[in-house]
Every structure is written in structure tokens, then in C-alpha cells.
Image (cartoon, helix red, strand yellow):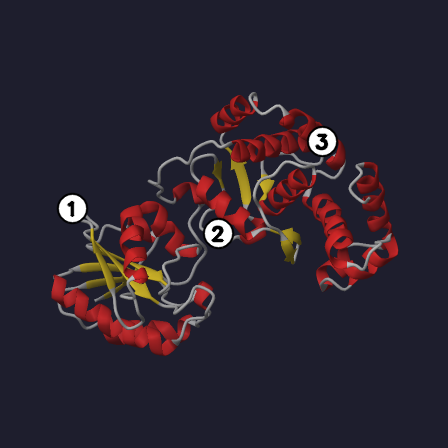
Amino acid sequence: MITRGTGNLLLADVDALVNTVNTVGVMGKGIALQFKRAFPDNFSDYKASCERGEVTVGRMHVHDLHQVSNPRFIVNFPTKRHWRSSSRLEDIASGLVALRDEIVKRGIESIAVPPLGCGNGGLSWSDVEPMIRQTLGTIPGVEVRVWEPAGAPSPNSMPNVTPTPPMTKERAAFLATLDRYIRSGIARGLAFEPRVSLLEAHKVAYFLQKLQLPLGLSFEKGPYGPYSQPLDRAVSSMEGHFITGFGDGTSGAQAILELNKDSVHDAESVLRDYPNFKDVAASFDKLVSGFEDAFGMELLSTVLFAAQELVTPPPTPESVTECIQGWNSRKQRLFTESHVQTAWHRLSQAGLLV
């Protein structure tokens, strides 16, 4: 019997939960990341199986939770061959047959199924739903609770039982500077709530490194300026512990982050033994003063990244403007030559364009 699932799939009262995965051992985004945080032992089991080459499309990887209460099983359903790849309908079809076999073999009487291969996988729900109904809808005595494509649950409602990561000096510097940035923006009337976008968080980290505070991050050209995939991973590891709002990563640069006040206090305590931070923080405050919103931070960081990484030396405001106008249509629309000149002046004052 097929029924419609509502609410947070991970909290469904069923025998088994289906998690969509790739075959290379990565749960970095979307519902897979939610499962990684909620069921870390399942992730460890799955990753080890991937390393042994045991996770393939058309075959279920089933993790037994060894508990009396629901859920009893996590069924890792490979919908992608690689996390970078799109999903294929033929892999969903063969996987559904394997899932049906597991349901029957293990005596599963109720199971929660997400929209397989849709969302990050790129498949159409109008193609996938009939396949689920045809393959799973006729299993006698089994409720198949199916979730249609929808937005992710709120970050606050996502289960997370992962251990709290250590408060390293790098994490402490990042969190403390985010807090300073948020408070400064509110004081200047550029923000009204103690929150910050992931877009701005990337720029904060970018400027900390440019001001000689090493965070071990690499940055590349992204749609919104300098972007660091390692920073996304770092923020994800802090989600639910030091930060809330990143969620399962599907909101991208528009994710709105809130800092845990106790974590900020812990960060400040760690930084008392980090004498260089006070000078870097003062330089950061001076650099971004008046630019403390998403537009200003994207502008300032884009100009610096273009000047240092993209244009032929020596950079000029004119060559950087031309570079930014060709970056993408969004930047062409947002940033004028006058904007670039303003950012150029501030970066020059900070000694970052020498």
C-alpha cells in the first residue's frame, strides 16, 4: 500500500528509512547529509562498504540498527554512481527491484521512501513516482510511505547526534569574526537580526586569510565571488553545534546562519591564547566597515579576487571592472565601474592591492 509521507522523513515511525546515496562513500548534501548526522554508525558502515566496492547501483546497502523501536533498518539506496553525477532512471528501476526484495526478505512492514533521484539527482518526479508505485505498491501487508519532492526541513528540526567538534583556534577565529561582523552590521543599520548568510561567511573567511590569519582554506572563482568548498564542509561539521542554518546544504549561498552564543564565548576564550587575532580582527573591522551586507562583501571580495587571481598584472580598476563584467550576468547587472572604484579604494587603503 502506498501512502503519502509528510513532515521530516527521518522522524517517521516506520520499520525502515530509505536514504539516497552515491557509490563512492560521500554523504555531503541533501537528505544523505541529514542521515549522516542522525545515524553516524550507518555512515561509517556505508563508507567502509564503498571502500570495499560493495555499494553499487541496483543493490541496496542495508544497515541494521539493532534496536527494538523504529526505525530498525536504514536502507541506503544508490541513486547516483558518483556524487557529481546525475541520477539515471535505469538505476532507479533496478534499485527499486532490489529494494522490494529486501523488504520481503527482512519482513519490513513499513518503510519511508524519499523522492528517489529527484532534487540533486535531477530526475523528474513525474517519471519516478509511477516507478515507485508499480514496483513497491503491490507488496502484501506493507505500507510504503512516499515523500514527494519538497524543500528540506528547517535546520532546527534535523536530528543530529554527531559529536561536538573541537574548538580549534581556526574555528574560534572564524566564529568570533562572524560574531563581530554581525554585531557591526546591526550597529550600522545594515542588518537587523543577528544572522549572516553563508555567502557572507565565505567572504569573512576569505578576508581573514588575506589578512594573514591562516585557516587552511582554498578559494576558487564562484558565482558569488571567491568560494571555498572546504569551508562548506567546515560549516557543515559545525552545524547543530556552533552554528545553525546550514541544514543539509541545499540552500547554498542563501543559507542563513545563526551562531550559538555559548560557542562564541568558547571561541573568545580560546583566542585569548592567540595573540595575533586581536590585530587581525582590528584590520578586518576596518577593511569591511560599511560593507557589512551580502552586496558589500561580495563586491569587496570579488574585486580583490579578480585583481589578484584573474587579470593580467598589474591590475587596474579598469581591468578589474572588465573582468567582473564578464564574470557572469549577475555581476554584470549588479556591479558598476563606480562600485569597483569604491571597493578598489578601500582595498588599497588596507594594503591588499600592492
Which circle's residue, 1 or 3, is located before the other in the chain?
1
Q: Which quadrant of the figure has residue 57? A: bottom left
Q: Is residue 194 visible?
A: no
Q: State which mark lies toward you, 2 or 3.
A: 3
SS of the residue under disc 2: loop
Question: Residue at the location (49% across, 32% down)?
Answer: 168
Most foreground residue, 165 or 32:
165
Give the image location of residue 86, x and y in percent: 45, 70
SS of the residue under disc 1: loop
What residue is disc 1 on? 67
Which circle's residue, 1 or 2, is located before the other in the chain?
1
Disc 1/disc 3 C-alpha distance (Å): 52 Å
Amino acid type, label 1: Gln
User: What's the mark number on residue 249?
Assistant: 2
Could you classify mark 2 by the number of other residues whose Cα lies within 10 Å: few (under 14), some (14-19), or many (20 or more)? Answer: many
Disc 1/disc 2 C-alpha distance (Å): 29 Å
What residue is disc 3 on? 285
Give the image location of residue 110, x and y in percent: 19, 59
Q: Is residue 63 left or right of residue 169?
A: left
Could you classify mark 3 by the number of other residues whose Cα lies within 10 Å: few (under 14), some (14-19), or many (20 or more)? Answer: some
Q: Which quadrant of the figure has residue 141? A: bottom left
Indicate whether 215 appears above or below 319.
above
Which residue extends farthest bottom? 90
Amino acid type, label 2: Gly
